[in-house]
Image: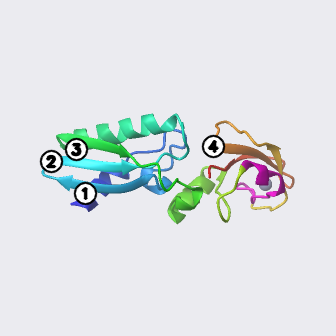
Amino acid sequence: MVAEIKAILETVSDPEIPVLSVLDLGVVRNMSKEGDAVTIQLTPTYNGCPAVDAMSMSIKLALLSAGYKTVHIETVLSPAWTSDWISDEGKQKLKAYGIAPPIGKSLYPEDMENLTPPCPQCGSEETTLVSAFGSTACKALFRCISCKEPFDYFKCH
Ligand SMILES: [Zn+2]
């Protein structure tokens, strides 16, 4: 039964990074089903992340259009989401999309200066931080010294 819900959630993507499903992102904490009512527990990627509303709306719509009559979305704030929750498959998808996946443990913005995520284009580890704030609050902008290409690094912690 839950496998059925899982299959539906796999089709719901992160509004900011369309190649990632909400399952890849690791924001779905729990799912349960009772009759034709579904309850999904969701943990936002960070407090006040505008993507969360869009995400719960997409999840709701996907489940309703799959025939479930009632969909409850519950927000669970603790423990807080960290980028460690992104699935390995999700990290591969990020890389293929040109975004360097988070490396190691979750990082705080102040650690960004010392960080050299490998370039998703050419794999070089000679990269440099351009801006701690990339195209969205969840990303930092880096530039590869080898191929000169700029790239986003997924930094949410
Ligand atoms: Zn490169």
For ligand 1, the image quadrant comes to: bottom right
Q: Which residue is mark 1?
A: 4
- The amino acid type of the residue labelled 3 equals Ala
First in sequence, mark 3 or 4: give its number: 3
First in sequence, mark 1 or 4: give its number: 1
- The amino acid type of the residue labelled 2 equals Asp
Query: Is the distance from the Cβ of mark 2 to the nearest ligand 1 atom less than 8 Å?
Result: no
Dot 2 and dot 3 residues touching (CB under 8 Å): no
Q: Which residues are magenta?
A: 109-122
Query: Is the distance from the Cβ of mark 1 to the nearest ligand 1 atom less than 8 Å?
Result: no
Q: Could you give the CA–CA distance between mark 2 and mark 1, rounded to whole angstroms?
A: 12 Å
Q: Which residue is mark 3?
A: 66
- The amino acid type of the residue labelled 4 equals Cys
Q: Could you give the CA–CA distance between mark 2 and mark 4, rounded to whole angstroms?
A: 35 Å
Number of other residues with Cα within 10 Å of mark 1, as a class: few under 14, some 14 to 19, many 20 or more: few
Q: Which residue is mark 4?
A: 138
First in sequence, mark 1 or 3: give its number: 1
Query: Which mark is nearer the camera, 1 or 4?
Result: 4
Q: Could you give the CA–CA distance between mark 2 and mark 3, rounded to whole angstroms?
A: 11 Å
First in sequence, mark 2 or 1: give its number: 1
- Residue 67: x %, y % from top left: 18, 43
- Residue 104: x %, y % from top left: 67, 65
Residue drawn where x is 75% and y is 58% of the image:
117
Q: Which residue is mark 2?
A: 36
- Residue 9: x %, y % from top left: 35, 50
Query: Which mark is nearer the camera, 3 or 4?
Result: 4
